Image (cartoon, rainbow, N blue to C red):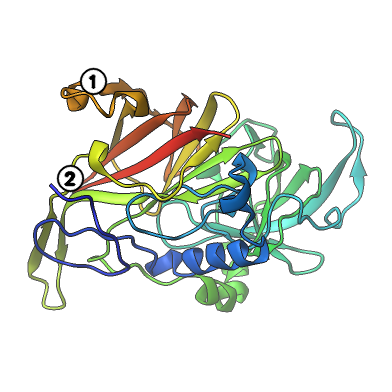
Amino acid sequence: MEAPDFDFGIEKGENSMKMIYKGKFLAAAAAALLFAAAAGGCASEEGSGGGSSAVSGNSQANSSVSENKQGNSSVSGSGMSAPADGKKDRSLEGVMTETLAMYVPFGEDGNYVMVDQDNGNVFTVTMPEEIYDMEGTLIGQEDLEKGNILRIYGNGLMLESYPGQYPGVEKIQVEETGSPSDADQYQEIIDGIYQEPDPSELPYMNVEYRTSLAVVTAMTATGGYQWEFPDEDGNMQSVIADTAHITDWEFSDSIGLEEPTDLTLWFSKTPGQVSAERWAETDLGAEDVVEKGEKVEVKTGTEDGQFLLEQAEAGYRYLIHAQWENGYVEYGFLTSAS
């Protein structure tokens, strides 16, 4: 069978493949390409984990530095702004900044933005383990409500993207309950960054990981899939694609790992089940290479759309199988030593 071919649209029929970057994450691929141009092609020249991309098949999309699946990042980890506005808090370990922001969720799958109540800046955060309600009880992101005023403690370093991305958050405290109607004033901002997803479009998956230099988000290849969706008349349509086995895929780039590294799998639509297998590059010449695959444990993350693949190693082809109520999609990527 032939290696998969990739483009940016839906193509029906056998052996069809696609990379999806539309709907509510329409700008993600464009932002990644802007970053690649700004970086001067350092990822392809140096092959370091800090600027590598991980796109398989014939796709040429490049990685971008990111800390949240919603942000359209355009700079590397070194491109950080000065600490966010706010006074220093010495009640926590070290010196941290405080930011007062409103929580504004939208769409599905845990999408949201924070709006700084001092300067109007819009950003997302890496949700910390410590999130507390007004009584000091430990809660999760799913317990936050539209209009909540949050006091956010962190290092104040914001990645330069839109919305901004704040990876160094240590703690969040609900300061005021607020009201959902309080967040309506920001609807124009939401309309500018969010579009309702087309039900015919396949969900896509990105891989996020940390290197010694930065936080990197890498796009992956889309393999075989089966997807059902309602058309404009409400009739169910089905699209099926079968592809070559991942051991026959041609990878133009890889995810560079300095050591065994935890990978976060971000899905644009949260799947019900996720499983993974991997094949060693050193086994590709063997006649029984397909049988040499080994299962890899995937854990559910703390946020919607997030799954964790712990201690991924260099020199493997990883195949991710994600299942939804209306179908499944397979994704693949290659790891290498950086």
Disc number for residue 244: 2
> Does residue 66 appear in this view?
no
Q: Position of residue 318 (x, y in %)?
A: 35, 34
Kind of residue at badge 2: Ala
Placement of 260 over or under 194, stated as above or below? above
Placement of 106 over or under 219, stated as above or below? below
> Does residue 286 appear in this view?
yes
Residue at point 41%, 50% (across, down): 252
Nearer-the-camera pick, 21 or 144: 21
- Identify the residue at the far front of this view: 285
The alpha-carbon separation of the residues under discs 2 and 1 comes to: 16 Å
Disc number for residue 292: 1
Q: Residues within 10 Å of mark 1 (few under 14, many from 20)?
A: few
Horizontal side of 204 relative to 73 (left or right) equals left
Residue 163 location, quadrant = bottom right
Q: Position of residue 169 (x, y in %)?
A: 72, 42
Q: Residues within 10 Å of mark 2 (few under 14, many from 20)?
A: some
Q: Position of residue 124 (x, y in %)?
A: 63, 55
Placement of 88 over or under 21, stated as above or below? above
Marks 2/1 in contact by CB < 8 Å: the verdict is no
- Identify the secondary structure beneath mark 2: loop
Horizontal side of 67 relative to 270 (left or right) equals right
Kind of residue at badge 1: Lys
